[in-house]
Structures are given as C-alpha cells and as structure tokens.
C-alpha cells in the first residue's frame, strides 16, 4: 500500500495529512489529521493529488514526512 504523510503550509494554517488509496483501488484522497476529515476530492494517482496542491493558491508549500521522495 502506498502512503504519504505530508505537512501542508497554507495561508491560514499548517496541517498534516495523509494521502491514502481507496480500498477499492478507485483513487487517492487526502485525510486531514488535524481535523480528522477525509477530503471528498478523489485523484486517479498520488501524483495527481500532489499536482492539485501545487495548483492551489492557498497552499504555500508542503514537505513529505514519510519515505524518501526522489
């Protein structure tokens, strides 16, 4: 199972989230660990989820807290 934990720096706050695959293999979603909230957005790949963050004006940046990205 692929799992990424990220710290997301937003204009209003900083949160930690997991990017988790759906059990049925239908895609990935963010789980906000600060609020215990599962984002209703669904992404085909983990790369699509990261690209979504890159395109959001409220996201200043993020860093990976698990694994080594390359």
Image (cartoon, grey):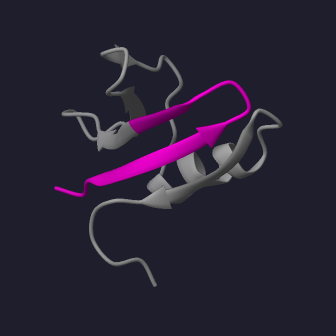
In this rendering, the answer to whether 53 lies above or below 32 is: below
Where residue 63 appears, as percent x and y from the top left, is: 50, 60
Residue 51 counted in the magenta span:
no
Looking at the image, can residue 28 be seen?
no
Q: Position of residue 68 (x, y in %)?
A: 33, 78
Task: State the residue at coordinates (30%, 16%).
Answer: 36
55 to the left or right of 32: right
* 10 or 21, nearer to the observer: 10
Q: Give the camera-side residue of 31 and 35.
A: 35
Residue 29 shown left or right of residue 36 in the figure: right
User: In what quadrant of the picture does the N terminus appear?
Assistant: bottom left
Height in image: 31 above or below 59? Answer: above
In the figure, 2 relative to 12: above or below? below
Q: Specify start and end residues of the magenta stretch as a single range.
A: 1-16
Q: Can residue 19 be seen in this view?
A: yes
Q: Quadrant of residue 26?
A: top left
Q: In the image, residue 40 lies at what x, y percent? A: 48, 16
Total marks shown come to 0
Is residue 4 one of those drawn in magenta?
Answer: yes
Left or right relative to 16: residue 52: right
User: Which residue sits at x=76%, y=32%?
Assistant: 58
Mostly what secondary structure, the magenta segment?
Answer: strand
- Give the answer, above or below, for where 8 lies relative to 67: above
Q: What residue appears at the point 36 percent right and 23 percent down from the top-left corner?
A: 34
Q: Which residue lies furthest to the right in this view?
A: 57
- Residue 23 found in image quarter: top left
Q: Position of residue 7 (x, y in %)?
A: 45, 47
At 22% from the left edge and 33% from the top edge, which residue is drawn? Answer: 24
């Amino acid at each position: 199972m692929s799992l990424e934990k990220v710290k997301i720096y937003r204009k209003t706050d900083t949160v930690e989230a997991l990017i988790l695959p759906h059990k049925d293999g239908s895609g990935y979603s963010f789980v906000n660990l600060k609020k215990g909230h599962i984002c209703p957005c669904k992404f085909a790949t983990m790369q699509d989820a990261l690209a979504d963050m890159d395109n959001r004006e409220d996201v200043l940046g993020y860093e990976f807290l698990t694994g080594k990205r390359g």
